Image: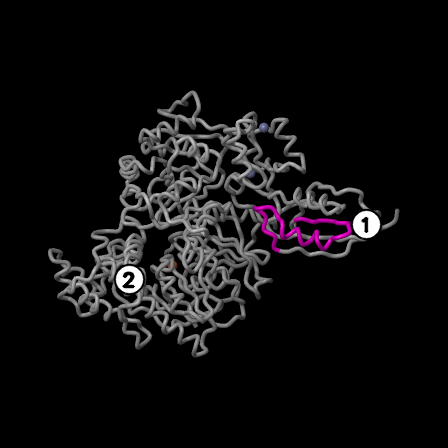
């Protein structure tokens, strides 16, 4: 027989370690295609011969397995020496450095059915997985993604697992973490330092029913678990963890969640995503103990995402509090010995297992808004997913950006894509900073990253900035203004082209160093990837007491009331508190730097409403309570408090005077909170709209930590209707997205002082 024509088909994207080759093999059987498929450094390569190769190519993208993400299917003619008589999967050809690693994925329906079926050999087995589900990034040591490079190397496959692993028709073909009760990891229950004999899961459930607190080893770290319906147990957990008010996350199956939360079809789909994030959902139906989330009208829910979680919930029969197993502010615990050392005083027992966690990944936290999904914390299930760089950045150099001080994350660009790391915590904490440095080295090694340019925040004292200086050495280090980075992050995730023209960025945020040496945080920046100008900003007020103003909202209220000529009202509200010192500090500018921060304005107003009396017990508490309150008076959103927006400085003084009148008239706090949100949205959206309508900007972008507030986001989006609008859906609006913006600005040759 002579030569035969066919095609050489290249598939790019997240196509390795997700069952793509067996999928191609089955497809080839179905469509009568012969040839071969293999993994290589660029993705998946197929040599195909057959009658309907167009249909074959279409199906490659259209019917790809659940965890695959096909970015491109490219094909070229190929000549076979002689027609291939079958379709074969051939061994990998070399390295895989350029292809993505898949994020960890929640247990798939097929595996779940298997562990619940007494006739299956994996019945009740807590480490069941397949190519469509299971651990990935959290067990990975180095690339390429092979069992020997994961923490599964400690377990030798039994003959039955080996047969599945080698069979292209099996859904466990080349599933690296494949395991069964005969050969894989095992769970145990440990109480008072000793392993309890018997069924660990049934006994753990028994303990939880009796009100115990357990440490449960998960995918990316340990959780602390207790019965969510048992108020005493939840309060007990708060006392032991010294966490007075920060909301706890909850785990339940869909029916349990439905009993306590408003569940839209979109929310159900998001919960059931293979990433299995914590999703903030409005509380409805049967109330949970107040201690689960004090002062909040939403609860953070997730579905069980490992077989161990499923088995535990099945045995327990109700929702569980599942909060990160860590000391306050520190990284989540991942090792068994580390857990015994650090968590023993919080818990009555440990539900352990012997598969090591190699990467610490917190649960991702997300919410749905009328404007689409929003990511608050990007970690397990989302990382290491990548984003394409916007048009015009195809040939960008490799850049490494270090983000900010809080909610830190780093960003790597390479081969036209951006990889934003997982959430690395607040770098004020020494251990989080250690983690941050480890992650930097780890990502560089894992992705063979050789940055030519480095980027960091303008603030010289951020630990991330100091680390950047040391890391960059003699290479270029670009310092990026904090809110310019927020703007660029929003442009980047919306694929705004490099030469797309200027965007008006409404950046409502906590604190960031401005190019004039003052502290910014309520800005309209007009700019692109290379530079910006500050078109408008919140009228500054002193941060009385410096850092103390961050923790204690009343200080911001005092500053704003005095600035609005409402000294007498301040005297009345703060009766019994000596105001002479803080006022003197503000007047003389001693430890009272001026700031245009919108976050601190939120704090000031929360103090006005009496929502946080002393210090906030966690970052963002005042703002979260404000949003919850405003939702109770939706009709008042149509009556914004007035701002003086005549000049570049948007002054909230008229708002505080109007609030003073509402207060005297006995208006409800919910109405006042709603009017505050509407006033802030109106004050910033009107000038941003004018920039677009006047031709100075091509679109409006909404970024900064305040846009985690869905009410504020929705109000702004409605006021900007009809204009091109860029908002965050994949990258956090908070400082967790900062590094992406820094990277793009550095790649574009921007950064430094505003022009
Ligand atoms: Zn599965
Ligand atoms: Zn086995
Ligand atoms: Fe920020």
Q: From the image, which quarter does the C terminus lie in?
A: bottom left
Label 1: state its secondary structure: strand
Badge 1 residue CB within 8 Å of ligand 1: no
Residue 32 picture location, percent across and down = 75, 46
Residue 383 picture location, percent across and down = 50, 48
Residue extending farthest to the top is: 197
Q: Is residue 60 magenta?
A: yes
Instruction: Please identify, in this view, whether the residue under mark 1 or under mark 2 is nearer the observer.
Output: 2
Residue drawn at point x = 48 percent, y = 50 percent: 421
Q: Is residue 584 above or below residue 619?
A: below
Residue drawn at point x = 43 percent, y = 33 percent: 314
Q: Nearer the viewer, residue 114 or 680?
A: 114
Residue ID for mark 2: 674
Residue 284 picture location, percent across and down = 33, 48
Residue ID for mark 1: 80
| Residue 469 visible, this angle | no
Determine the image quadrant of residue 632.
bottom left
Q: Is residue 733 above or below residue 310?
A: below
Q: Nearer the viewer, residue 542 or 285?
A: 285
Find the distance from the CA under tag 1 to the CA under tag 2: 70 Å
The mark tally for this picture is 2
Residue 219 picture location, percent across and down = 47, 38
On residue 688, which mark appears? none
| Residue 228 visible, this angle | yes
Q: Which residues are magenta?
A: 44-71
Residue drawn at point x = 47 percent, y = 45 percent: 276
């Amino acid at each position: 027989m002579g030569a035969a024509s066919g095609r050489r088909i290249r598939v790019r994207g997240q196509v390795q370690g997700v069952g793509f080759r067996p999928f191609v093999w089955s497809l080839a059987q179905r469509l009568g295609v012969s040839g071969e498929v293999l993994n290589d450094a660029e993705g998946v390569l197929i040599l195909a011969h057959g009658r309907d190769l167009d249909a074959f190519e279409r199906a490659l993208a259209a019917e790809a397995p659940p965890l695959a993400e096909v970015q491109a299917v490219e094909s070229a003619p190929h000549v076979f020496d002689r027609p291939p008589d079958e379709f074969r999967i051939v061994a990998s050809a070399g390295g895989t450095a350029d292809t993505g690693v898949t994020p960890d994925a929640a247990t798939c329906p097929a595996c779940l059915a298997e562990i619940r079926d007494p006739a299956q050999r994996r019945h009740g087995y807590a480490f069941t997985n397949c190519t469509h589900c299971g651990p990935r990034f959290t067990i990975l040591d180095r690339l390429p993604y092979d069992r020997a490079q994961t923490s599964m190397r400690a377990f030798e496959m039994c003959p039955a697992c080996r047969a599945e692993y080698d069979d292209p028709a099996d859904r466990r073909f080349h599933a690296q973490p494949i395991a069964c009760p005969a050969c894989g990891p095992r769970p145990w229950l440990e109480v008072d330092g000793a392993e309890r004999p018997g069924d660990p899961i049934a006994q753990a459930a028994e303990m939880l029913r009796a009100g115990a607190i357990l440490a449960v080893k998960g995918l990316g770290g340990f959780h602390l678990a207790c019965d969510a319906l048992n108020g005493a147990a939840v309060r007990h957990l708060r006392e032991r963890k010294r966490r007075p008010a920060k909301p706890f996350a909850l785990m339940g199956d869909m029916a349990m969640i439905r009993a306590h939360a408003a569940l839209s079809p979109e929310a159900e789909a998001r919960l059931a995503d293979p990433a299995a994030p914590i999703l903030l959902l409005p509380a409805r139906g049967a109330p949970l103990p107040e201690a689960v989330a004090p002062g909040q009208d939403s609860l953070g829910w997730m579905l069980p995402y490992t077989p161990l979680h499923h088995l535990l919930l099945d045995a327990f029969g109700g929702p569980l509090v599942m909060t990160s197993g860590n000391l306050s502010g520190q990284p989540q615990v991942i090792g068994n010995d580390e857990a015994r050392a650090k968590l023993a005083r919080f818990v009555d027992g440990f539900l352990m297992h012997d598969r090591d966690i190699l990467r610490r990944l917190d649960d991702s936290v997300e919410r749905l808004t009328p404007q689409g999904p929003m990511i608050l914390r990007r970690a397990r299930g989302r990382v290491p997913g990548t984003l394409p760089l916007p048009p015009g950045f195809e040939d960008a150099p490799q850049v490494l950006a270090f983000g900010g001080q809080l909610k830190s994350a780093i960003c790597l660009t390479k081969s036209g894509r951006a990889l934003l790391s997982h959430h690395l915590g607040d770098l004020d904490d020494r251990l989080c900073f250690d983690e941050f440095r480890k992650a930097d080295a780890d990502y560089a090694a894992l992705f063979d990253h050789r940055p030519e340019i480095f980027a960091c925040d303008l603030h010289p004292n951020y630990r991330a900035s100091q680390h950047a200086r040391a890391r960059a050495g003699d290479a270029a280090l670009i310092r990026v203004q904090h809110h310019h980075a927020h703007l660029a992050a929003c442009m980047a995730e919306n694929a705004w082209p490099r030469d797309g023209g200027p965007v008006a960025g409404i950046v409502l945020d906590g604190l960031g160093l401005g190019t004039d040496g003052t502290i910014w945080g309520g800005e309209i920046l007009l700019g692109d990837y290379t530079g910006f100008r500050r078109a408008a900003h919140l009228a500054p007020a002193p941060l009385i007491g410096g850092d103390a103003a961050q923790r204690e909202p009343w200080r911001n209220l005092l500053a704003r009331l005095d600035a609005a000529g409402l000294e007498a009202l301040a005297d009345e509200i703060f009766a019994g508190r000596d105001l002479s010192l803080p006022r003197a500090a503000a007047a003389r500018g001693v430890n009272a730097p001026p700031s245009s921060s919108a976050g601190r304005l939120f704090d000031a107003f929360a103090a006005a409403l009496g929502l946080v009396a002393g210090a906030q017990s966690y970052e963002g508490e005042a703002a979260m309570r404000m949003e919850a309150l405003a939702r109770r008076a939706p009709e008042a959103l149509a009556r914004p408090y007035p701002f003086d927006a005549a000049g570049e400085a948007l002054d909230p003084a008229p708002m505080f005077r109007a609030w003073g009148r509402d207060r005297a008239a006995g208006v409800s706090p919910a109405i006042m909170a709603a009017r505050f949100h509407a006033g802030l949205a109106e004050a910033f959206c009107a000038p941003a709209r004018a920039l677009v309508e006047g031709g100075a900007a091509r679109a409006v972008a909404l970024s900064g930590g305040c846009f985690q507030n869905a009410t504020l986001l929705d109000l702004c989006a409605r006021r900007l209707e009809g204009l091109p609008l860029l908002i965050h859906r994949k990258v956090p609006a908070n400082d967790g997205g900062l590094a992406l913006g820094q990277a793009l600005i550095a790649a574009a040759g921007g950064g430094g002082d505003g022009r």
